[in-house]
Image (spheres, rainbow, N blue to C red):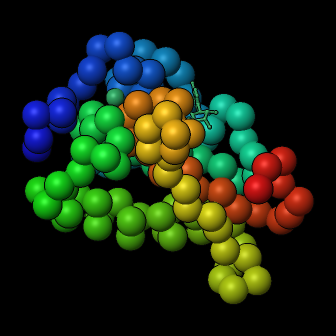
Amino acid sequence: MSNLDHLHQPDCLFCKIVARKIPSRVVYEDEEFFAFHDIHPWAPVHFLLIPKLHIHSMAQLDDRHANMMGRMMVLVPKLAKQEGCNPYPEGGFRLLTNTGAEGGQEVHHLHFHVMGGPRPWARG
Ligand code: AMP
Ligand code: ZN
Protein backbone atom coordinates (compact mmCIF):
# COMPACT_ATOMS: atom_id res chain seq x y z
CA MET A 1 0.00 0.00 0.00
CA SER A 2 1.22 3.50 -0.77
CA ASN A 3 0.04 6.76 0.73
CA LEU A 4 -2.38 7.13 -2.17
CA ASP A 5 -4.09 3.79 -1.46
CA HIS A 6 -7.15 3.77 0.70
CA LEU A 7 -9.47 0.88 1.33
CA HIS A 8 -12.39 3.02 0.34
CA GLN A 9 -12.84 6.64 -0.72
CA PRO A 10 -16.32 7.86 0.21
CA ASP A 11 -16.61 10.24 -2.75
CA CYS A 12 -15.33 7.76 -5.37
CA LEU A 13 -17.89 6.47 -7.88
CA PHE A 14 -16.28 3.05 -8.24
CA CYS A 15 -15.82 2.62 -4.46
CA LYS A 16 -19.57 3.33 -4.19
CA ILE A 17 -20.26 0.67 -6.83
CA VAL A 18 -18.15 -1.87 -4.90
CA ALA A 19 -20.07 -0.96 -1.72
CA ARG A 20 -23.38 -1.42 -3.61
CA LYS A 21 -24.30 2.21 -2.84
CA ILE A 22 -24.65 2.69 -6.61
CA PRO A 23 -26.13 -0.21 -8.59
CA SER A 24 -24.19 -1.96 -11.34
CA ARG A 25 -24.45 -5.09 -13.43
CA VAL A 26 -21.91 -7.25 -11.66
CA VAL A 27 -19.66 -9.50 -13.74
CA TYR A 28 -17.36 -10.83 -11.01
CA GLU A 29 -16.41 -10.33 -7.39
CA ASP A 30 -13.83 -11.80 -5.06
CA GLU A 31 -11.97 -10.50 -2.00
CA GLU A 32 -9.64 -8.32 -4.07
CA PHE A 33 -11.42 -7.46 -7.32
CA PHE A 34 -14.76 -6.34 -8.72
CA ALA A 35 -15.97 -6.28 -12.33
CA PHE A 36 -19.13 -4.71 -13.75
CA HIS A 37 -20.59 -3.75 -17.11
CA ASP A 38 -19.70 -0.30 -18.42
CA ILE A 39 -22.79 1.92 -18.43
CA HIS A 40 -21.89 3.23 -21.93
CA PRO A 41 -20.53 0.18 -23.76
CA TRP A 42 -18.45 0.67 -26.91
CA ALA A 43 -18.52 -3.00 -27.85
CA PRO A 44 -20.90 -5.97 -27.51
CA VAL A 45 -18.86 -6.98 -24.44
CA HIS A 46 -17.57 -4.05 -22.36
CA PHE A 47 -16.93 -4.39 -18.68
CA LEU A 48 -14.61 -2.74 -16.16
CA LEU A 49 -12.30 -4.69 -13.84
CA ILE A 50 -11.10 -2.86 -10.73
CA PRO A 51 -9.21 -3.60 -7.53
CA LYS A 52 -11.45 -3.08 -4.50
CA LEU A 53 -8.54 -1.17 -2.98
CA HIS A 54 -8.85 2.47 -4.02
CA ILE A 55 -5.83 3.31 -6.18
CA HIS A 56 -6.27 6.46 -8.26
CA SER A 57 -4.59 5.19 -11.44
CA MET A 58 -1.66 3.30 -12.95
CA ALA A 59 0.48 6.35 -12.07
CA GLN A 60 0.38 5.42 -8.36
CA LEU A 61 1.61 1.83 -8.79
CA ASP A 62 4.89 0.70 -7.27
CA ASP A 63 6.61 -2.63 -6.62
CA ARG A 64 4.28 -3.42 -3.75
CA HIS A 65 1.38 -3.65 -6.20
CA ALA A 66 3.10 -6.09 -8.57
CA ASN A 67 1.53 -9.30 -7.27
CA MET A 68 -1.94 -7.77 -7.05
CA MET A 69 -1.66 -6.40 -10.60
CA GLY A 70 -0.49 -9.80 -11.83
CA ARG A 71 -3.54 -11.45 -10.30
CA MET A 72 -5.73 -8.79 -11.95
CA MET A 73 -4.16 -9.40 -15.36
CA VAL A 74 -4.72 -13.15 -15.30
CA LEU A 75 -8.39 -12.58 -14.44
CA VAL A 76 -8.89 -10.72 -17.74
CA PRO A 77 -8.99 -13.69 -20.14
CA LYS A 78 -11.15 -15.71 -17.75
CA LEU A 79 -13.74 -12.94 -17.43
CA ALA A 80 -13.59 -12.08 -21.15
CA LYS A 81 -14.49 -15.70 -21.93
CA GLN A 82 -17.21 -15.75 -19.25
CA GLU A 83 -18.79 -12.59 -20.72
CA GLY A 84 -18.91 -13.98 -24.24
CA CYS A 85 -15.78 -12.76 -26.01
CA ASN A 86 -15.05 -15.17 -28.85
CA PRO A 87 -11.94 -17.37 -28.70
CA TYR A 88 -8.50 -16.17 -29.77
CA PRO A 89 -7.33 -15.60 -32.48
CA GLU A 90 -10.52 -14.96 -34.51
CA GLY A 91 -12.21 -13.42 -31.47
CA GLY A 92 -10.20 -11.97 -28.62
CA PHE A 93 -10.62 -8.75 -26.68
CA ARG A 94 -9.15 -5.29 -26.11
CA LEU A 95 -7.66 -4.33 -22.72
CA LEU A 96 -7.45 -0.57 -22.09
CA THR A 97 -6.62 1.63 -19.13
CA ASN A 98 -6.65 5.43 -19.20
CA THR A 99 -4.32 7.29 -16.84
CA GLY A 100 -4.69 10.95 -15.93
CA ALA A 101 -6.39 13.75 -17.84
CA GLU A 102 -4.12 13.50 -20.86
CA GLY A 103 -4.61 9.73 -20.82
CA GLY A 104 -8.37 10.24 -21.04
CA GLN A 105 -9.16 9.08 -17.49
CA GLU A 106 -12.55 10.25 -16.20
CA VAL A 107 -13.02 8.08 -13.12
CA HIS A 108 -10.01 8.20 -10.80
CA HIS A 109 -10.15 4.66 -9.43
CA LEU A 110 -7.84 2.32 -11.35
CA HIS A 111 -9.80 0.27 -13.88
CA PHE A 112 -9.23 -1.92 -16.91
CA HIS A 113 -11.74 -1.72 -19.75
CA VAL A 114 -12.24 -5.17 -21.31
CA MET A 115 -13.98 -5.02 -24.71
CA GLY A 116 -14.82 -7.69 -27.22
CA GLY A 117 -17.42 -9.28 -29.44
CA PRO A 118 -18.17 -8.96 -33.14
CA ARG A 119 -17.29 -5.68 -34.89
CA PRO A 120 -18.11 -2.96 -35.77
CA TRP A 121 -17.87 -1.30 -32.35
CA ALA A 122 -19.13 2.14 -31.42
CA ARG A 123 -15.56 3.39 -30.90
CA GLY A 124 -12.11 2.10 -31.78
P1 AMP B 1 -12.35 6.27 -18.04
O1 AMP B 1 -12.67 7.33 -19.05
O2 AMP B 1 -11.30 5.28 -18.49
O3 AMP B 1 -12.10 6.82 -16.67
O4 AMP B 1 -13.64 5.35 -17.99
C1 AMP B 1 -14.69 5.52 -17.11
C2 AMP B 1 -15.78 4.57 -17.58
O5 AMP B 1 -16.70 4.42 -16.53
C3 AMP B 1 -16.54 5.07 -18.81
O6 AMP B 1 -16.43 4.12 -19.88
C4 AMP B 1 -17.98 5.18 -18.30
O7 AMP B 1 -18.94 4.80 -19.26
C5 AMP B 1 -17.97 4.24 -17.10
N1 AMP B 1 -18.95 4.56 -16.08
C6 AMP B 1 -19.21 5.77 -15.54
N2 AMP B 1 -20.19 5.67 -14.60
C7 AMP B 1 -20.54 4.35 -14.56
C8 AMP B 1 -21.48 3.59 -13.79
N3 AMP B 1 -22.28 4.17 -12.87
N4 AMP B 1 -21.59 2.27 -14.03
C9 AMP B 1 -20.80 1.67 -14.95
N5 AMP B 1 -19.89 2.32 -15.69
C10 AMP B 1 -19.75 3.65 -15.50
ZN1 ZN C 1 -12.38 4.28 -5.42
In the picture as drawn, the residue positioned furthest to the front comes out as 102
Q: Is residue 36 visible?
A: no
Quadrant location, ligand no. 2: top left
Q: Position of residue 1 (x, y in %)?
A: 10, 43
Please identify the quarter of the rendering in which residue 80 is found. Answer: bottom right
User: Is residue 98 positioned above or below 118 on the image?
Assistant: above
Report the quarter where the C terminus lies: bottom right
Q: Residue at x 20, y 63 (%)?
A: 66
Q: Position of residue 71 (x, y in %)?
A: 29, 64
Please identify the quarter of the rendering in which residue 10 is found. Answer: top left
Q: Total marks drawn?
A: 0
Q: Residue at x 64, y 67 (%)?
A: 93
Q: Nearer the viewer, residue 18 or 73?
A: 73
Q: Residue at x 39, y 65 (%)?
A: 73
Query: Taking 40 as reference, is 12 left or right?
Result: left
Q: Position of residue 56 (x, y in %)?
A: 32, 35
Query: Taking 94 as reference, is 17 left or right?
Result: left
In the picture as drawn, the residue positioned furthest to the bottom comes out as 89
User: Is residue 10 positioned above or below 17 on the image?
Assistant: above
User: Is residue 123 positioned above or below 89 on the image?
Assistant: above
Query: Taking 109 as reference, is 86 left or right?
Result: right
Q: Is residue 120 visible?
A: yes
Q: Position of residue 92 (x, y in %)?
A: 66, 74
Q: Nearer the viewer, residue 65 or 38?
A: 65
Query: Taking 62 as reference, is 59 left or right?
Result: right
In the picture as drawn, the residue positioned furthest to the right comes out as 120
Q: Residue at x 66, y 83 (%)?
A: 88
